[in-house]
Image (spheres, rainbow, N blue to C red):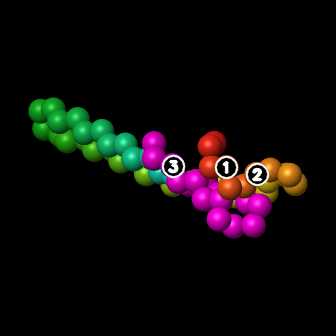
Amino acid sequence: MPAVVDLEKCDVLSIEGERKAEEEVTDEGYCYCERAYVRFYREILLPAGVQKWNKEV
């Protein structure tokens, strides 16, 4: 799952990502297809004293 971490805002850790899944079943007389797509975004306030420019997470 790809993730993006953004520490450019004032003392806030932003994390976002997405997940996609697809399943298809074909048999005699029918075809079944299921798709799922989930996207998330979270912002976490960093405690005082955290070195926000150290981007190792």
Between 15 and 55, which is closer to the camera in this rendering?
55
The residue to which callout 2 is attached is 51
Q: Amino acid at mark 3?
A: Ala
The residue to which callout 1 is attached is 54
* Residue 31, image x, y percentages: 20, 41
Earlier-in-chain disc, 3 versus 2: 3
* Residue 36, image x, y percentages: 41, 48
Q: Quadrant of residue 1?
A: top left
Residue drawn at x 75%, y 67% as measured from the top left: 10
Label 3–label 1 contact, CB within 8 A: no
* Residue 2, image x, y percentages: 45, 47
Mark 1: few/some/many CA within 10 Å (<14, 14-19, 20+): few
**Is residue 12 on the magenta stretch?**
yes
Q: Which quadrant: the C terminus? A: top right
**Alpha carbon distance from label 1 to label 2:** 6 Å
Residue positioned most to the right:
48
**Is residue 5 found left or right of 9 in the rendered image?**
left
* Residue 9, image x, y percentages: 69, 67
Numbered disc in front, either 3 or 1: 1
The total number of labels drawn is: 3
Mark 3: few/some/many CA within 10 Å (<14, 14-19, 20+): few
The residue to which callout 3 is attached is 3
Label 1–label 2 contact, CB within 8 A: yes
Residues drawn in magenta = 1-16
